[in-house]
């Protein structure tokens, strides 16, 4: 084992002990902490700081270039498609976004203030589209000094801390000159954040499928990783996470407690309200010329679930188009057997995409 590897191991152990001491001290009242416990805590903090400095001296310097913010912001591109219904795709045009007024307002206002937010909801309920929405409206709603990066934690590149850091920097459009990218740690991301902050630029990290960090490579994504992210948020980074479970449960699964989750406001992403479902039908159906019975069917079969609404709309649109272009038998709205078959096809598609 090299000197650097030995030092990294020693630093990891010291950080674990420091975390335990901090947890013990926090359990006392402000006036009841034993003096010897405070001395142990300060000694351990100094030890961690000294070890960190030694490790940085052994690590080859990582050079990075932060490009200047654009003076002007180009408008969004319009993606002309034959159908407005998008199944399992990313949001690329804000015109396709419907509803979620409270959720949208919360993440925009908190991001503008530099506060972090946690989106929690079932799979395929619309969390990723909220991240995409922020990415698309940030130039106009937040201003050009905000840099939005989208990171999908399920990517292979995010199976290690170094890969995660490199992905974040790439998405932030930071050019790296790293002799050894595998040696990247959160301190590199911290240095970049400080540099961005000095230029009056605010990074926003949209971390999708965040629960993946609690399932893969726990040796890397331990409590130190989460506490490192919390520290980076404290110096000028906005974290916007999307996960199936609350962050407090995610961190507790790793085996201990951490104050990581308490910098976030939790926003629950649920099914559409009846009003939101109606808004979806009115907006999207009018773009493809659905009549009233077809709109009623879209609303009925969609069941206020964002994905089901998209699926029903796409299937109806395709059946109608194919009946006009190829075979009239493919769309028989007055035939009960058609709707029975339609419902079976819908359930097959939906169950294939969502665990129900």
Image (cartoon, helix red, strand yellow):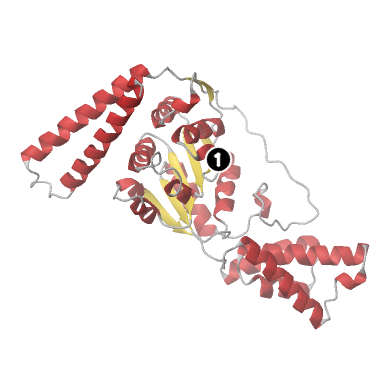
Q: Is residue 70 visible?
A: yes
Q: Is residue 299 above or below residue 248?
A: below
Which residue is more in the foreground, 137 or 228? 228
Q: Is residue 202 above or below residue 329?
A: above
Which x, y percent locates residue 6? 31, 26
Which x, y percent locates residue 142? 52, 40
Which quadrant is the C terminus positioned in? Answer: bottom right
Horizontally, residue 245 falls left or right of residue 256, namely right
Check the image and name the residue furthest to the front: 1
Residue 16: which quarter of the image?
top left
Which residue is more in the foreground, 263 or 227? 227
Which x, y percent locates residue 103? 50, 56
Residue drawn 40% across and 35% down? 236
Q: Would you name the residue on which mark 1 appears? A: 156
Which quadrant is the N terminus positioned in? Answer: top left
Residue drawn 75% across and 46% down? 79
Residue drawn 55% across and 46% down? 134
Q: Is residue 286 above or below residue 208?
A: below
Q: How many marks?
A: 1
For disc 1, the neighbor class at 10 Å (few under 14, some 14 to 19, many from 20) is few
């Amino acid at each position: 084992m090299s000197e650097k590897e030995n030092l990294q191991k020693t630093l990891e152990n010291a950080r674990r002990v420091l975390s335990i001491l901090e947890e013990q001290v926090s359990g006392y009242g402000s006036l009841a902490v034993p003096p010897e416990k405070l001395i142990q805590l300060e000694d351990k903090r100094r030890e961690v700081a000294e070890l960190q400095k030694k490790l940085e001296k052994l690590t080859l310097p990582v050079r990075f270039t932060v490009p200047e913010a654009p003076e002007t912001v180009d408008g969004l591109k319009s993606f002309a498609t034959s159908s407005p219904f998008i199944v399992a795709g990313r949001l690329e045009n804000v015109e396709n976004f419907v509803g979620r007024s409270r959720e949208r307002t919360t993440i925009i206002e908190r991001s503008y203030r530099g506060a972090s937010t946690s989106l929690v909801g079932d799979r395929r309920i619309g969390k990723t589209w909220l991240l995409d929405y922020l990415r698309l409206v940030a130039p106009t709603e937040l201003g050009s000094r905000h840099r939005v990066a989208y990171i999908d934690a399920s990517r292979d590149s995010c199976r290690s801390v170094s890969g995660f850091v490199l992905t974040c920097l790439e998405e932030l459009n930071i050019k790296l000159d790293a002799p050894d990218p595998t040696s990247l740690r959160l301190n590199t991301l911290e240095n970049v954040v400080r540099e961005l902050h000095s230029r009056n630029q605010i990074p926003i990290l949209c971390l999708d499928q965040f629960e993946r960090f609690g399932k893969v490579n726990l040796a890397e994504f331990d409590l130190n990783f989460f506490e490192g992210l919390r520290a980076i948020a404290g110096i000028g980074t906005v974290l916007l996470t999307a996960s199936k479970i609350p962050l407090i449960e995610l961190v507790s699964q790793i085996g201990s407690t951490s104050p990581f989750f308490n910098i976030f406001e939790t926003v629950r992403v649920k099914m559409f309200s009846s009003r939101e479902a109606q808004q979806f039908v009115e907006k999207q159906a009018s773009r493809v010329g659905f009549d009233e019975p077809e709109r009623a069917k879209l609303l009925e079969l969609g069941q206020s679930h964002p994905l089901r609404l998209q699926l029903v709309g796409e299937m109806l649109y395709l059946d109608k188009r194919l009946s006009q272009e190829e075979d009239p038998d493919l769309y028989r709205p007055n035939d009960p057997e058609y709707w029975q078959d339609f419902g079976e096809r819908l359930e097959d598609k939906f169950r294939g995409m969502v665990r129900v």
